[in-house]
Amino acid sequence: MIRLNPNKEYNFLLVHCAEYRDGVGSILSIPCIEILKRHFKHSKIYFLAHSSMKDFFINNPFLEHVFFIDDVNLRKKLRENKIHVAISLFPDKVSTIALFRANIKTRIGIFSKFHSLLFNYKIKQKRTQSDKHEILYNISLLKPLGCDEASFPKIYLNIHEKQVAQQYVNTIFNDSTYIAICPSSAMQGIHFGWSIKNFFHLANELCRDYNVLILATKEELDSYKDILKNYENISENNIFDSQKIDISCDYKRKMIATLSCASLCIANNHVLLHSANAFDIPTISFFPYTKYINPMRYAPLSSKHIHKILTPYGIFNPKDSNNHSYIDAQDSMRLANITPQLVLDIIKGLQ
C-alpha cells in the first residue's frame, strides 16, 4: 500500500499509449480516471495516451489534461506539471522509459518485461490468463493507492457536438434513429472478428427495413466505396460523411458524435464498439475465443444488460465461459458459423 492522504493535492498520471488501431485498451482505461478523482477529490488527474486517441478524452470532467506519447516535448511537459504518481496500465517500453526520464517519483506498473524494472512499485499480473475483464485488471492497479470501486467507460460530448451530429442523422434519414455498422477489426495488425463481406451483406439486408450508417476511418471508407456496386440496397448515403457535420473538430470526434445518435451498434472488438458502450448504446458484437482475445476479457462492460456477444460457441454467457476452451487462433478468427441471417434474426428479435 502506498500511503497517500485523500484530502491532500497530488498530480496523478494514468498511462495507456496504444494507437487508434489497438485503442481498445485505452478506452477500457477511462474508468480509472473517475475512480482516482473520486478518491482523491482535491488532486489533478492527467492521462498519457497516443495522439490518435485524443478525441476520446475530450470534455472528461474528471480529467485535467492529456499528454501524448508522440509529443517531442513530452519529458519537458511532464516535468513542468510535477507529476507525483504515474500508473502504467499497459507497460510499453517507450512510455515506461519516458516516465523514468521525467523523474516521476512514484511509478506503478506491471512487472512483466525487462524494462519493468524502471517501475519502483511493481505489481504482478498475468493478463494472458484472461481470467477477468481488462477494466478489472486496470482497476486492480489502483489498489495500492487505496482505490477499490467499480466504474465503466464514458465518453463526453458537449451539447453542440451532439446537436450537430443529430442534425446530420436527421438530414440523411427521415427517422432520427439508425443502426451503426462498424466493420473495423484489428489488433497488432491482425484481423480478429467477423469479415467485412459479412458486415456488408448484413447492411444490405438491413437497409430494406432500417436506417443504416457504416462508420470507419477515412481510409477504410474509401476502400468500402469500391464494393458498393455489389450491394443493391446500400448507397453512398449509407457511408459516413464527416464533411456534412459542421463542427470544428477532428474526423474521429465527428464519427463518435454521430455514433452517439445510433439506436444499435454492430461491431467487432474495436474502439467503436467500446465507444458505443460508453454512450450506453445497445450492441451486437463478434468475438473470437483465443487465449488473448475473448469476451471474458474484452466484452462491452456496463451497468446495463444491453449487449449481445456472438462467439464461435454461440451467444456469450459469462456463466458458461468456464465450460469452453480456447480455440486455435485461425479457426476462431473466422467465426465462420455466424451468418448474416442469424444476426438479422437477432436484430428483429430485439425490436
Image (spheres, rainbow, N blue to C red):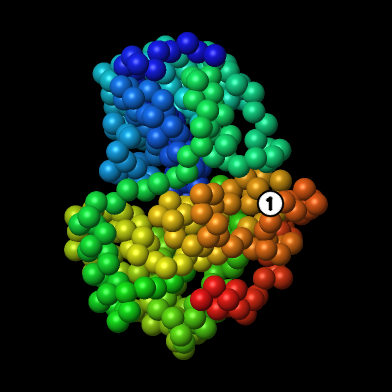
Give the mark count. 1
Name the residue located 46 percent from the left edge and 85 percent from the top edge. Answer: 209
Structural crowding at the residue carrying mark 1, measured as other residues with C-alpha within 10 Å and reported as few (<14), some (14–19) or many (≥20) = few
Residue lying at 65% horizontally and 48% vertically, measured from the top left: 296
Q: Looking at this view, is 89 or 263 the one in front?
A: 263
**Residue at position x 59%, y 68% in the image:** 195
Q: Amino acid at mark 1?
A: Pro
Residue 106 seen from this side: yes
Q: Is residue 275 visible?
A: no
- Where is residue 23? Give x, y as percent: 47, 46
Classify residue 164 as left or right of residue 40. Answer: left
Compare residues 297 and 191 and report the one nearer the observer: 297
From what the image shows, is residue 337 above or below residue 281?
A: below
In the displayed structure, 199 sits above or below 110; it is below
Residue picked out by circle 1: 318
Q: Nearer the viewer, residue 96 or 83?
A: 83
Residue 146 at x, y percent in the picture? 50, 20
Please determine whether, in this image, residue 81 is positioned above or below residue 296: above
Q: Position of residue 236 (x, y in %)?
A: 36, 79
Q: Quadrant of residue 39?
A: top left
Nearer to the camera, 196 or 311? 311
Side of 119 relative to 214 (left or right): right
Name the quarter where the N terminus is drawn.
top right
Q: Residue 164: percent from the left, percent from the top?
A: 22, 63
SS type, badge 1: helix
Image quadrant of residue 341? bottom right
Q: Who's the residue at 39% across and 73% down the image? A: 178
